[in-house]
Image (cartoon, rainbow, N blue to C red):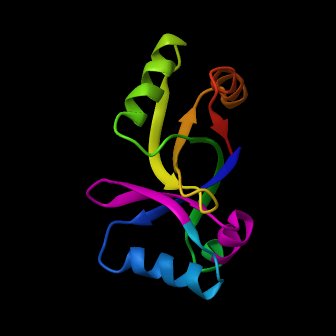
């Protein structure tokens, strides 16, 4: 199970740079990221190399942050890999709140980062289907 850093940020020029600058100063690597925005504010979701230290550094600079459990599922690096994963979710009656892509730095294989309602149940279901979770 992975920890995801969610950052509530104003939607204005330079904010993303400020976030990445803080993480760089703290020597924290961004392993995967997705942003959702609205007219005035957005949520930056990231899996980082040190989530606790990232929260401390960012909140110290005035950002509102939250840590959330997410599931990382390693998939094959081939056409249709996401489709096959989603078929298995559908067959198992599992709803995905959101997902984004990262990579396993050791194997070079894609990792789908997922937020679901019951992570432990979903993880057990996917392991029974042969998926590797992180």
> What is the magenta range?
31-57
Q: Is residue 44 visible?
A: no
Return the residue nearer the eye: 74 or 55.
Answer: 74
Question: Does residue 133 sit above or below 101 in this rendering?
Answer: above
Left or right? Give the position of 80 relative to 29.
left
Quadrant placement of the C terminus: top right
* Residue at the spot 57% in from the left edge and 83% down from the top edge: 24
* Residue at the spot 40% in from the left edge and 74% down from the top edge: 16
Residue 13 coordinates in the image, percent (x, y): 29, 77
Does residue 45 belong to the magenta stretch?
yes
Left or right? Give the position of 65 relative to 127.
left
Return the residue nearer the eye: 131 or 49.
Answer: 131
Return the residue nearer the eye: 1 or 5.
Answer: 1
Q: Is residue 27 visible?
A: yes
Q: Quadrant of residue 123?
A: top right
Question: Does residue 9 sit above or below 132 in this rendering?
Answer: below
Quadrant placement of the N terminus: top right
Farthest-out residue, left: 39
Does residue 40 belong to the magenta stretch?
yes
Residue 75 coordinates in the image, percent (x, y): 52, 40
* Residue at the spot 45% in from the left edge and 38% down from the top edge: 98
Residue 94 coordinates in the image, percent (x, y): 53, 19
Question: Does residue 9 sit above or below 89 in this rendering?
Answer: below
């Amino acid at each position: 199970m992975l920890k995801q850093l969610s950052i509530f940020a104003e939607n204005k020029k330079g904010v993303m740079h400020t976030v990445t600058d803080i993480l760089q100063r703290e020597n924290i690597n961004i392993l995967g990221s997705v942003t959702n925005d609205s007219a005035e504010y957005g949520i930056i979701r990231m899996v980082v190399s040190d989530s606790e230290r990232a929260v401390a550094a960012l909140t110290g600079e005035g950002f509102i942050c939250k840590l959330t459990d997410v599931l990382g599922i390693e998939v094959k690096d081939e056409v249709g890999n996401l489709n096959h994963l989603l078929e298995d979710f559908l067959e198992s009656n599992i709803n995905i709140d959101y997902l984004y892509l990262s990579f396993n730095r050791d194997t070079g294989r894609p990792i789908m980062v997922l937020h679901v309602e019951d992570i432990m149940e979903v993880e057990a279901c996917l392991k029974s289907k042969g998926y590797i979770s992180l």
